[in-house]
Image (tube, rainbow, N blue to C red):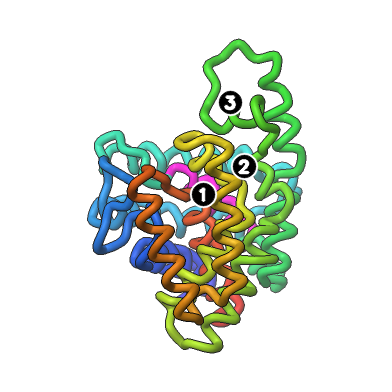
Amino acid sequence: MKKVDILGELATRSILLEVSTYPKPGLVTPFSSGAHRDMDFTLFLKSTAVLSQGFKEVSHYGYNYNGELNKMLPPLRKLGLDVESRMFEVTKGINTQKGLIFLFYLILGASGYLLKKRKLSPKNISSSVSKITSGITKKELESIRKSKKPLSKGENIFLKHGITGIRGEVEKGLPTVMEYGLPEFTKAYEKTQDLNKSSLHSLIAIMSKAEDTNIISRNGIDAYYGIQKKSEEIIKVGGVLTTTGMTKILDLEMEFLKSNISPGGAADLLSATLFLYFVEKEI
């Protein structure tokens, strides 16, 4: 199998492992729909099958791309829209993974490009994603102050709170993944050799820092800051590596179910974390 095809395989694997991780507070798992009434584990599997087809295509696009990285965003988005359309067909209009398509098309476009140049590494993927999305926050968020078009949830949150969400995350080179998600996953996996526990630990670390507009749009800014603080406290007491940490995670899960909280943005970044880990170990 060509290495460029393995990129798509690792992306699909990462997403399947993320959705299979449990107990994830407020999120879909094999045993719970979390805070979601309109989606479940089976729907995520169907949706991921759609994405897996596109992942191969976008990896090859990046591999064959000869232009400048700061010109790659428009064609990547165009490719992503085709898969997004098919995703909505399969899910009957339910948005299971729209944000994930945006994130992974950037990551895979960058990964294919770097593979061709024999420079593939998590650090280089991070910096390449930043170059591809250079100026996206200013162009797409600052400009909406004058816009008369209906705004998305993320755009409304930017106007109200100045939080840049996933656009800011990718433009900065995935700092939440690189500085928290990946190091904490690696630490937990070295100690446990357990993908599920390590993924859960990484998710909590990501939740402590990620600008998760899912939470803000559903539950408000105060809930968002409160969740960041609680997640940080869980990591401080050892996360999945301690009984205290696991007890706090289970408490957080009950709170999220009660308050209808879903850290969907953090879940997407966990998938990205897993992908970067597998790239480093297997390609």
Name which residue type carries label 1.
Gly
Give the quarter of the figure containing the N terminus.
bottom left
- Going by the numbered disc 3, the residue's amino acid type is Asn
Give the position of the C terminus as an image quadrant: bottom right
Of the numbered discs 1 and 3, the one sitting upstream in the chain is 3
Residue wearing tag 1: 265
Which one is in front, 257 or 117? 257
**On screen, residue 9 above or below 106:** below
Q: Residue at x 52, y 63 (%)?
A: 204
The segment highlighted magenta reads: 98-111
Q: Is residue 19 magenta?
A: no
The reply to whether discs 1 and 2 touch (Cβ–Cβ < 8 Å) is yes
Q: Is residue 106 magenta?
A: yes
Q: Which residue is mark 3?
A: 156
Q: Is residue 3 above or below residue 29?
A: below
Helix, strand or loop status at disc 2 = helix
Residue that numbered label 2 is attached to: 165
Disc 1 is placed on an element classified as helix
Relative horizontal placement of residue 247, taking residue 183 as reference (left or right): left
